[in-house]
Amino acid sequence: MLDWTQLNTTCSNCQSCVLGQTRTNIVIGRGNINAPILFVGEGPGEQEDLHGQPFVGAAGQLLDTLLEALMLKQDDYYIANVVKCRPPNNRVPTDDEAEKCLPYLRNQVALIRPKIIVCLGSTAAKYVISKDIKITQIRGKWIERKGYWMMPTFHPAALLRDQSKKVLLFRDIKEVKQKLHNIMDEKDN
Ligand code: URA
Protein backbone atom coordinates (compact mmCIF):
# COMPACT_ATOMS: atom_id res chain seq x y z
CA MET A 1 0.00 0.00 0.00
CA LEU A 2 1.26 3.47 -0.86
CA ASP A 3 1.13 6.37 1.60
CA TRP A 4 -0.45 9.64 0.47
CA THR A 5 2.82 11.14 -0.80
CA GLN A 6 3.67 8.01 -2.78
CA LEU A 7 0.12 7.79 -4.11
CA ASN A 8 0.17 11.42 -5.26
CA THR A 9 3.50 10.93 -7.03
CA THR A 10 2.49 7.63 -8.62
CA CYS A 11 -0.83 9.03 -9.87
CA SER A 12 0.82 12.19 -11.17
CA ASN A 13 3.23 10.10 -13.25
CA CYS A 14 0.66 7.51 -14.30
CA GLN A 15 0.43 6.59 -17.99
CA SER A 16 -1.23 3.19 -17.46
CA CYS A 17 -4.09 4.00 -19.83
CA VAL A 18 -4.76 6.42 -22.70
CA LEU A 19 -6.38 9.02 -20.41
CA GLY A 20 -2.92 9.91 -19.13
CA GLN A 21 -2.08 11.35 -22.56
CA THR A 22 -4.89 13.90 -22.61
CA ARG A 23 -5.24 15.02 -18.98
CA THR A 24 -4.34 18.54 -17.92
CA ASN A 25 -4.23 17.61 -14.24
CA ILE A 26 -4.63 14.41 -12.32
CA VAL A 27 -7.66 14.55 -10.01
CA ILE A 28 -6.97 12.47 -6.93
CA GLY A 29 -9.50 13.69 -4.39
CA ARG A 30 -10.50 16.40 -1.95
CA GLY A 31 -11.67 16.57 1.63
CA ASN A 32 -10.66 15.09 4.95
CA ILE A 33 -8.32 12.11 4.52
CA ASN A 34 -9.61 10.73 7.84
CA ALA A 35 -13.28 11.24 7.00
CA PRO A 36 -15.96 8.68 7.91
CA ILE A 37 -17.68 9.10 4.52
CA LEU A 38 -16.15 8.59 1.08
CA PHE A 39 -18.07 9.80 -1.98
CA VAL A 40 -17.06 8.17 -5.25
CA GLY A 41 -17.97 9.69 -8.61
CA GLU A 42 -17.21 8.59 -12.16
CA GLY A 43 -14.33 10.69 -13.39
CA PRO A 44 -13.18 14.29 -13.77
CA GLY A 45 -15.00 16.62 -16.15
CA GLU A 46 -13.62 19.74 -17.80
CA GLN A 47 -13.48 21.93 -14.69
CA GLU A 48 -12.03 19.15 -12.58
CA ASP A 49 -9.34 18.49 -15.20
CA LEU A 50 -8.47 22.20 -15.24
CA HIS A 51 -8.33 22.57 -11.45
CA GLY A 52 -7.06 19.15 -10.39
CA GLN A 53 -9.97 18.83 -7.93
CA PRO A 54 -13.01 16.55 -8.08
CA PHE A 55 -16.56 17.85 -8.27
CA VAL A 56 -15.85 21.55 -8.77
CA GLY A 57 -18.03 22.00 -11.89
CA ALA A 58 -21.83 22.17 -12.14
CA ALA A 59 -22.41 18.68 -10.68
CA GLY A 60 -20.00 19.48 -7.85
CA GLN A 61 -21.83 22.69 -6.98
CA LEU A 62 -25.03 20.72 -6.77
CA LEU A 63 -23.39 18.14 -4.54
CA ASP A 64 -21.96 20.86 -2.28
CA THR A 65 -25.39 22.52 -2.01
CA LEU A 66 -26.96 19.19 -1.08
CA LEU A 67 -24.32 18.40 1.54
CA GLU A 68 -24.63 21.89 3.01
CA ALA A 69 -28.43 21.65 3.09
CA LEU A 70 -28.14 18.41 5.04
CA MET A 71 -25.57 20.06 7.31
CA LEU A 72 -22.88 17.53 6.64
CA LYS A 73 -19.60 19.05 7.76
CA GLN A 74 -16.69 19.25 5.31
CA ASP A 75 -14.71 17.26 7.86
CA ASP A 76 -17.16 14.39 7.45
CA TYR A 77 -16.24 13.48 3.89
CA TYR A 78 -13.65 12.89 1.20
CA ILE A 79 -14.53 12.87 -2.51
CA ALA A 80 -12.80 10.80 -5.21
CA ASN A 81 -13.59 9.19 -8.56
CA VAL A 82 -13.32 5.81 -10.27
CA VAL A 83 -10.86 7.28 -12.80
CA LYS A 84 -8.42 10.06 -11.99
CA CYS A 85 -8.01 11.52 -15.47
CA ARG A 86 -10.71 13.17 -17.57
CA PRO A 87 -12.16 10.95 -20.30
CA PRO A 88 -12.29 13.04 -23.52
CA ASN A 89 -15.66 14.77 -23.99
CA ASN A 90 -16.71 13.39 -20.59
CA ARG A 91 -17.46 9.98 -22.05
CA VAL A 92 -17.92 7.05 -19.66
CA PRO A 93 -14.55 5.47 -18.80
CA THR A 94 -13.90 2.14 -20.56
CA ASP A 95 -13.49 -1.08 -18.57
CA ASP A 96 -9.77 -1.00 -19.27
CA GLU A 97 -9.42 2.58 -17.98
CA ALA A 98 -11.45 1.86 -14.87
CA GLU A 99 -9.62 -1.39 -14.07
CA LYS A 100 -6.22 0.27 -14.50
CA CYS A 101 -7.22 3.10 -12.17
CA LEU A 102 -9.10 1.12 -9.50
CA PRO A 103 -6.00 0.13 -7.50
CA TYR A 104 -5.54 3.84 -6.72
CA LEU A 105 -9.10 4.13 -5.41
CA ARG A 106 -8.63 0.93 -3.37
CA ASN A 107 -5.44 2.43 -1.98
CA GLN A 108 -7.37 5.57 -1.01
CA VAL A 109 -10.03 3.45 0.73
CA ALA A 110 -7.30 1.60 2.64
CA LEU A 111 -5.73 4.90 3.75
CA ILE A 112 -8.98 6.68 4.66
CA ARG A 113 -10.78 3.62 6.10
CA PRO A 114 -14.18 5.31 5.83
CA LYS A 115 -17.22 3.86 7.57
CA ILE A 116 -19.48 4.64 4.61
CA ILE A 117 -18.86 4.67 0.85
CA VAL A 118 -21.41 6.52 -1.26
CA CYS A 119 -21.40 5.52 -4.93
CA LEU A 120 -22.55 8.46 -7.02
CA GLY A 121 -24.08 7.02 -10.19
CA SER A 122 -23.84 3.81 -12.15
CA THR A 123 -20.11 3.87 -12.96
CA ALA A 124 -19.15 4.13 -9.28
CA ALA A 125 -21.70 1.46 -8.31
CA LYS A 126 -20.46 -0.81 -11.10
CA TYR A 127 -16.80 -0.72 -10.12
CA VAL A 128 -17.14 -0.35 -6.35
CA ILE A 129 -20.11 -2.65 -5.69
CA SER A 130 -20.78 -5.02 -8.56
CA LYS A 131 -20.33 -5.21 -12.32
CA ASP A 132 -23.87 -6.29 -13.15
CA ILE A 133 -26.07 -3.96 -11.18
CA LYS A 134 -28.58 -1.42 -12.31
CA ILE A 135 -28.45 1.82 -10.33
CA THR A 136 -32.23 2.20 -10.56
CA GLN A 137 -32.66 -1.20 -8.86
CA ILE A 138 -30.16 -0.87 -6.04
CA ARG A 139 -30.18 2.87 -5.33
CA GLY A 140 -31.03 3.78 -1.80
CA LYS A 141 -30.30 0.28 -0.45
CA TRP A 142 -27.51 -0.32 2.03
CA ILE A 143 -24.91 -2.96 1.20
CA GLU A 144 -22.39 -4.04 3.84
CA ARG A 145 -19.14 -5.42 2.54
CA LYS A 146 -15.76 -5.97 4.17
CA GLY A 147 -16.78 -3.77 7.07
CA TYR A 148 -17.85 -0.85 4.85
CA TRP A 149 -21.40 0.37 4.54
CA MET A 150 -22.11 1.23 0.91
CA MET A 151 -24.92 3.39 -0.41
CA PRO A 152 -25.50 3.52 -4.18
CA THR A 153 -27.34 6.63 -5.32
CA PHE A 154 -27.77 8.88 -8.32
CA HIS A 155 -24.95 10.97 -9.69
CA PRO A 156 -25.65 14.68 -9.08
CA ALA A 157 -25.23 15.31 -12.82
CA ALA A 158 -28.31 13.13 -13.39
CA LEU A 159 -30.32 15.77 -11.53
CA LEU A 160 -29.24 18.41 -13.98
CA ARG A 161 -31.09 16.35 -16.61
CA ASP A 162 -33.97 15.02 -14.51
CA GLN A 163 -35.22 17.04 -11.53
CA SER A 164 -37.42 14.18 -10.28
CA LYS A 165 -34.28 12.41 -9.04
CA LYS A 166 -33.53 15.23 -6.62
CA VAL A 167 -35.89 13.99 -3.91
CA LEU A 168 -34.37 10.51 -4.04
CA LEU A 169 -30.77 11.68 -3.97
CA PHE A 170 -31.64 13.98 -1.06
CA ARG A 171 -33.33 11.08 0.75
CA ASP A 172 -30.31 8.80 0.21
CA ILE A 173 -27.81 11.33 1.54
CA LYS A 174 -30.08 11.92 4.53
CA GLU A 175 -29.93 8.16 5.15
CA VAL A 176 -26.14 8.39 4.99
CA LYS A 177 -26.13 11.12 7.61
CA GLN A 178 -28.41 9.08 9.86
CA LYS A 179 -26.22 5.99 9.44
CA LEU A 180 -23.16 8.02 10.36
CA HIS A 181 -24.86 9.18 13.55
CA ASN A 182 -25.88 5.61 14.40
CA ILE A 183 -22.33 4.35 13.87
CA MET A 184 -20.89 7.15 16.00
CA ASP A 185 -23.48 6.52 18.76
CA GLU A 186 -22.59 2.80 18.78
CA LYS A 187 -18.91 3.69 19.08
CA ASP A 188 -19.60 5.97 22.08
CA ASN A 189 -21.65 3.35 23.95
N1 URA B 1 -18.46 14.05 -12.23
C1 URA B 1 -17.77 13.08 -11.59
O1 URA B 1 -18.16 11.92 -11.61
N2 URA B 1 -16.67 13.43 -10.96
C2 URA B 1 -16.21 14.66 -10.90
O2 URA B 1 -15.19 14.87 -10.27
C3 URA B 1 -16.96 15.66 -11.55
C4 URA B 1 -18.07 15.33 -12.21
Image: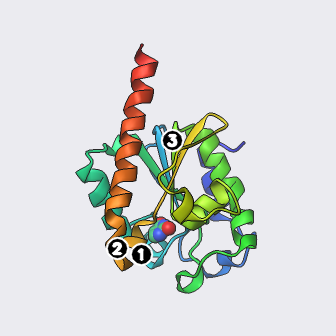
Query: Which residue: 49% across, 47% down?
Result: 38
Q: Nearer the viewer, residue 66 or 7?
A: 66
Residue 28 position, x and y percent, is 55, 59
What amino acid type should be assigned to the residue bearing mark 1? Answer: Gln
Q: Is mark 1 within 8 Å of ligand 1?
A: yes
Q: Is residue 109 left or right of residue 31?
A: right
Q: What's the CA distance linking mark 2 and mark 1?
A: 9 Å
Residue 32 position, x and y percent, is 43, 43
> In this figure, which residue is indicated by the disc labeled 3?
116
Instruction: Classify residue 2 by image quadrant.
Output: top right
> In this figure, which residue is indicated by the disc labeled 2?
58
Q: Residues within 10 Å of mark 3 (few under 14, many from 20)?
A: many
Query: Which residue: 71% across, 54% down?
Result: 103
Q: Is residue 175 visible?
A: yes
> In this figure, which residue is indicated by the disc labeled 1?
47
Q: Residues within 10 Å of mark 1 (few under 14, many from 20)?
A: some
Residue 55 position, x and y percent, is 42, 65
Count of marks placed on residues: 3
Q: What's the CA distance linking mark 3 and mark 2?
A: 24 Å
Query: Which residue: 60% across, 54% down?
Result: 8
3 or 1: tag closer to the N-terminus: 1
Give the secondary structure at mark 3. strand
Residue farthest along the top direction in this orientation: 189
Do the residues under discs 2 and 1 have CB atoms within 8 angstroms? Answer: yes
The C terminus - image quarter? top left
